[in-house]
Amino acid sequence: MTQATRADLIERPSTDKGLRPGAVGLVSSIVVGVASTAPAYSLAAALGFIVVSGVGSQVVGVHAPGVVLLAFVPMYFIAVAYQQLNKAEPDCGTTFTWASRAFGPILGWVGGWGIIVADVIVMANLAQIAGQTTFGLLGNLGDLVGYTPMAKFFGEIAVNYWWELAAGIVWIALMTWICYRGIEVSARLQRILLSIEVVILVVFAVFALVKVYTGHGAATSILPQWDWFNPFALNFGSVLAPGLLAAIFIYWGWDSAVSINEETSEPAKTPGRAAIISTVLLLLTYTVVTTASVSYAGIGDKGIGLANPDNSDNVFLSLGPSLFGDSVIGHILMTLLTISILTSASASTQTTILPTARTTLSMAVYKAVPERFARIHPRFLTPTWSTVGMGIASVGFYALVTFISNDLLTPLIDSIGLMIAFYYGLTGFACVWFYRRTFRRSTKNFIQQFLFPLLGGLMLAYAFVYGLITYAEADWEVDSKGHNLAVNLFGWVVGDDAVFGVGGILIGFVLMFIWWAIRPDFFRGKTLPRQSADLVLAADGSRIAGFGLPDSGYQATLIAPDRSNLPPGEEAVPADQEELPPR
């Protein structure tokens, strides 16, 4: 095969998809990455589940800050994998594209599906939180201004199914419209929403810790201990693995910074940097806020305790009244806390739509899904069918789940953890395989292209297996009436968490085989062929570059498939046609 032909196979410029190049810079990419995780919403929805993760009396408990710290490790490792893969191919399909390049169409397609189904499922929980918090905010405003009928009205409709459903649908529709309008509008709005959210979270944490240390905490308050930050005091199989999956959920979303890579300045560099910076910022935020929450509320199952099932849907709204009190200042702070959760949920709703729409866009470009999903708005330069389709699918799933039972929203958090571990882990392994010919060139490459991605993938695979075994237990989780949340599958009673997690992935296989029968080109490798990192800078513009040991005296420079980092006047050549240059 000629050099030109090989290059043509892997080169796919970002302009092919019609997105707006250079629309987002590093700061906006970081904002999108952090906002996508929705710190306030994620902690409000998942902190209670992290605390009670385990079996019987063996639970995470006060070690929640340690589990949050441990969950950062695979997230950071996978963020490095994203950075390295994005250098080679900045494609908005991310896991779908990279896994297809590394392992072929089947795993690539399922990896893309993992992103889609996890995003659609979490939208149901996001919509519910947004709806509840909207009514809670309006009720707090009624209390603040002393208008009791207003506070009473919104307090009543907050628990009404139809009002809650309508509010959730309105939020999904609004965020879908903003994403449809353009990436610049989305990024600007994210800056505002994230600023509000982070400031209020810091105020919450400081307020809680000051109260505890000054002896003015709640009856359940406990002073922080260094032992809280040691997750290895927990049993891995029955406690740490489920807790880790729940904690992984709160970090999930930073990859949105990479999914908009074709719309960023310097697409081979900016998204990867943004992903890594986002995970570090999240670590700092989550560690402080988790420690403050556990310290102030305690881990009891009564009152404001984090293990109280009545608080698990939104721990911040449960803690707020006790923490801030009933004064005017207290009502103002409670209103601000409610606003932070609402802005967090709305920001996450928006940034959940962004990466999913771009994943389906990329899949459509490569004919892995119907090509109409590749359509771009001529003015806004955003995916049309993909964005609107994500909104419609989210509304449909949210309405279906809440119609069946609101209790089903509880196991969704844990099941999403399984899906996240699946496609993040797949990305880590894809990085290792993609760079299998190049990671030996230097110590830096060994760490970033092999060691970190491999460790991240193995950790997530381990957590996936152990978590799945635990979630499959029939008595793993109960509903508000004390009934086991489980399904009888041909005489085998399986926990809902495992059914949602594995079932969501298996549905993808069914859809994949259906599309394979209809349009087989992608699955035959015609539209997105398997490749490895095999373009390098030609030595001195003449001889073909080769790969050597770190002390070989020559280090080949990796060139992205779109040649975005190719110096002017230089040449990119396939690495497997290597001929070591003279030393």
Image (cartoon, rainbow, N blue to C red):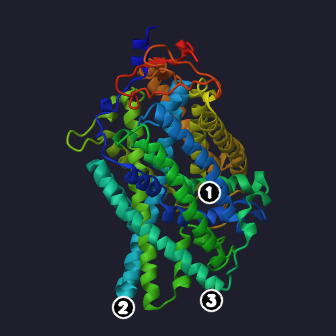
Q: Name the residue nearer the viewer: 449 or 507.
A: 449
Q: What percent of the width, then of the height, locates residue 447?
A: 63, 38
Image quadrant containing the C terminus? top right
Residue at mark 2: 146
**Is disc 2 surrounded by few (<14), some (14 to 19) or many (20+) residues within 10 Å?**
few
Q: Residue furthest front?
A: 583
Residue at mark 1: 247
**Amino acid type at mark 1:** Ala
**Amino acid type at mark 3:** His
Q: Residue at x 42, y 79 (%)?
A: 335
Query: Is 62 displayed left or right of 369 in the figure?
Result: right
Q: What percent of the width, then of the height, locates residue 534?
A: 51, 21
Q: Secondary structure at mark 1?
A: helix
Query: Is 164 displayed left or right of 65 in the figure?
Result: left
The disc, 3 or 1, on the residue closer to the chain's N-terminal end is 3
Residue at mark 3: 216
Q: CA distance from mark 3 to mark 1?
A: 29 Å
**Amino acid type at mark 2:** Gly
Which of discs 2 and 1 lies nearer the camera? The answer is: 1
Q: Residue at x 36, y 91 (%)?
A: 146
**Residue 159 showing in the rendered view:** no
Q: Secondary structure at mark 2?
A: loop
Labelled pair 2, 1 in contact (Cβ < 8 Å): no
Labelled pair 3, 1 in contact (Cβ < 8 Å): no
Q: Name the residue nearer the viewer: 436 or 418.
A: 436
**Is disc 3 surrounded by few (<14), some (14 to 19) or many (20+) residues within 10 Å?**
some
